[in-house]
Amino acid sequence: MPADGRLPMPASDAGLRVDDVAFTPAPTGEGFGAAGRWFAFAPGARVAARMRFRTFARDDAPPASAQATLPHAAIVRPAADAP
């Protein structure tokens, strides 16, 4: 968790469709800014996030990987591997 308690998360755009996102614990706030979408948590909190999304090919490049889409994640599991 960043020192300011703001966890950055991607927002839908031409190459990404975010269908659902859920957190444990629940965030205390949400915001959008020049750097994108973020959710507020207590600084230093350990947060579990579950997100359903789909990436799309853009500009002759293949769809982004899950790890590239969620660069701040400690662990990324595709849905096929999720319990």
Image: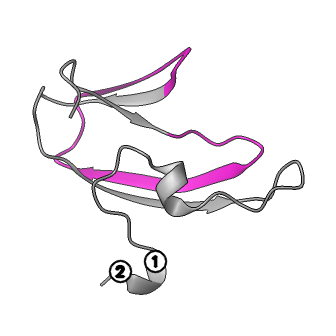
The answer to whether residue 81 is above or below residue 27 is: below
Provide the residue span drawn in magenta: 10-36
Going by the picture, which residue comes out furthest to the right? 60
SS at circle 1: helix
**Image quadrant where residue 76 sits:** bottom left
Could you tell me which residue is drawn at 52 percent across and 20 percent down?
A: 35
In the picture, measured across the screen, residue 37 lies left or right of residue 73, that is right
Q: Position of residue 10 (x, y in %)?
A: 52, 40
Q: Position of residue 7 (x, y in %)?
A: 32, 33
Looking at the rendered image, the quarter that the N terminus falls into is: top left
SS at circle 2: loop
Could you tell me which residue is drawn at 34 percent across and 53 percent down?
A: 22
Q: Which residue is mark 1?
A: 79
**Image quadrant where residue 82 sits:** bottom left
Judging depth in this view, the residue of 51 and 70 nearest the camera is 70
Three-letter residue code for mark 2:
Ala
* Residue 70, label in figure: none
Q: Position of residue 36 (x, y in %)?
A: 53, 25
Tell me if residue 32 is in the magenta stretch.
yes
Give how far apart the Cα atoms at labels 1 and 2 are: 5 Å
The answer to whether residue 33 is above or below residue 37 is: above
Could you tell me which residue is drawn at 54 percent across and 50 percent down?
A: 69
In the picture, measured across the screen, residue 45 lies left or right of residue 48, that is left
The answer to whether residue 11 is above or below residue 81 is: above
Judging depth in this view, the residue of 57 and 11 nearest the camera is 57
Q: How many marks?
A: 2
* Residue 82, label in figure: 2
Q: Are marks 1 and 2 in contact (CB under 8 Å)?
A: yes
